[in-house]
Amino acid sequence: MFEYKLNTKNKPTRRNLLEIGSLSALGLTLPHFLLADQKQKPNSAKSCIFIYQYGGLSQLDSWDPKPDSPEGIRGPYKTIATRIPGFRTGELMPKLAQRADKYTVIRSMSHSVPVHDIANRMLLAGQSNPPMNAPSFGSILSKLKPSPGDVPSYVWLQKFGGGASPPDSTYLTGGYLGMGNSPLLVGTTHLENPSIPGYKIKAFESSGFSHEQLISRKNLLSKIEESSNSDKPRHSISDFREKAFNILTGDKAKTAFDIDREPTKTREQYGMHPMGQNLLLARRLIESGVRTVGVVAWTGLAPKDKFVSLETWDMHGNAGISIFENGWNGLGWALPRCDEAVSALLDDLETRGMLDSTLVVLVGEFGRTPKISKGGSAIGRDHWPKCYSAMIAGGGAKKGLVYGASDSTAAYVKDNPVSPEDFSATILHMMGIAPETRLSPDGFTLPASIGTPVQGLV
């Protein structure tokens, strides 16, 4: 049998491609050639929980404090030691500080767009200039690593809300990969979240049809398609419909979403607020076989707060709450709840033997300005994409590492910048997917990522 092997350490050369052209008679076309090496890498993550700190967390008050900077920059919070010598965090993160040997912090995330909706599209697509139909990271994983069995491949917990949210087409449609790779959305408003007593998701409601009626309608549709004279391929559509039907009528997915099955003690460890309960739900989904869960890190409302937006981390001060206060839009409220929820998630995954196979990502679309300013009626920090921080844990990521460095005020990257492209390529690599894997409709024009995995993180 004729066998052609590509040196996968390098991209195909012009000579490679010319040689490939002569192989078509043997049944090996260019798209098949480019996809031939996409085998699952050993020891890679099986699933991913991607936590979006929508609005942009202040790096100076969390992962990259600068206690020696001037008063108008450093903020009021002290720093605390972690389990890693020389690595200190802000004092509002004591639980994560004690678990610093479980994760890596990147202090050199960087891009140039200080606009929420565009920056969120960049983060979701892993591109500095993504087209409007670019698929999100979760949709790419749904395409290349679909879940087995009767559970969805991709779930999104808590829809983006507020004027700064990205278009729905950015993350709820699957982009050019199609609706079959879009996420199952759970939580369309702030009143739909598992921290509300008696909460039940609406995703499995079937408009009043019984199980038998659904089967009857499914069979009828199949017969109509079989008798159609259309020559258009329907195989993939049928596959998606079959899986959707199995999810809707089966018990596995419904059981995974039933957070009331969790012991009260476990729920309290995560925190009885939207972020905590959504992360617990994310763990349940991953445990059931879901590949990717995106979670908007909304920490809920403080006592006497009125709902304004899910943009917890957009702390300008223009919501009438200072960045250093304890309202819903202040670090004093939001960061301790994030600390509680993410710490509980890491502990829970580790206890269940799932941390090595589950990649956990905690990141926002950008950071905040070093200079503290007045926004409206309160003080805050404004948008700042030039330098910010992210955390990754599990799934093959290094542990106890601080990667990259900022300057003396966390304004600019000093060492090892990480672009949106390289960040997405790194995540794909950790998930066992080569960034150069072809995804576009023609099968080979566009890669999953144009970035390069950051070897220092893996």
Image (tube, rainbow, N blue to C red):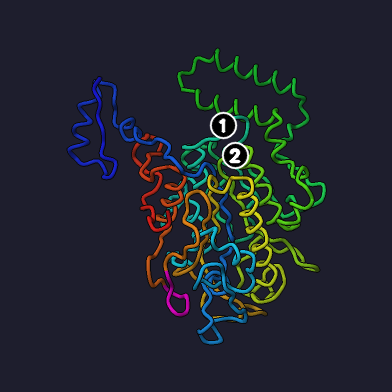
* The N terminus - image quarter: top left
Give the percent coordinates (x, y) of residue 442: 37, 34
Q: Residue at x 42, y 40 (%)?
A: 41
Q: Residues within 10 Å of mark 2 (few under 14, many from 20)?
A: many
- Disc 2 marks a residue whose amino acid type is Val
Q: Extreme bottom residue here?
A: 70
Q: CA distance from mark 1 to mark 2?
A: 8 Å
**Circle 1 residues within 10 Å: few <14, some 14–19, many ≥20:** few
Asked which secondary structure carries label 2, the reply is: loop
**Magenta: predominant secondary structure element?**
loop
The magenta stretch is 405-412
Name the residue nearer the viewer: 218 or 324.
324
Relative to 332, is 441 on the left or the right?
Answer: left
Query: Which element type, helix, strand or loop, lies under badge 1?
Result: loop
Q: Which mark is residue 290?
A: 2
The reply to whether the magenta stretch includes residue 139 is: no
Name which residue lies at 65% across and 51% down: 348
Q: Is residue 409 magenta?
A: yes
Residue pictured at 73% horizontal, 51% vertical: 193
The count of marks equals 2
Q: Amino acid at mark 1?
A: Pro
Q: Position of residue 50 (x, y in %)?
A: 56, 52
Residue designated by label 1: 148
Whether label 1 touches label 2, CB < 8 Å: no
Name the foreground residue: 88 vs 111.
Answer: 88
Q: Upstream in the sequence, badge 1 or badge 2?
A: 1
Q: Position of residue 35 (x, y in %)?
A: 35, 34
Residue sitting nearer the eye, 172 or 402 = 402
- Relative to 9, is 246 above or below? above
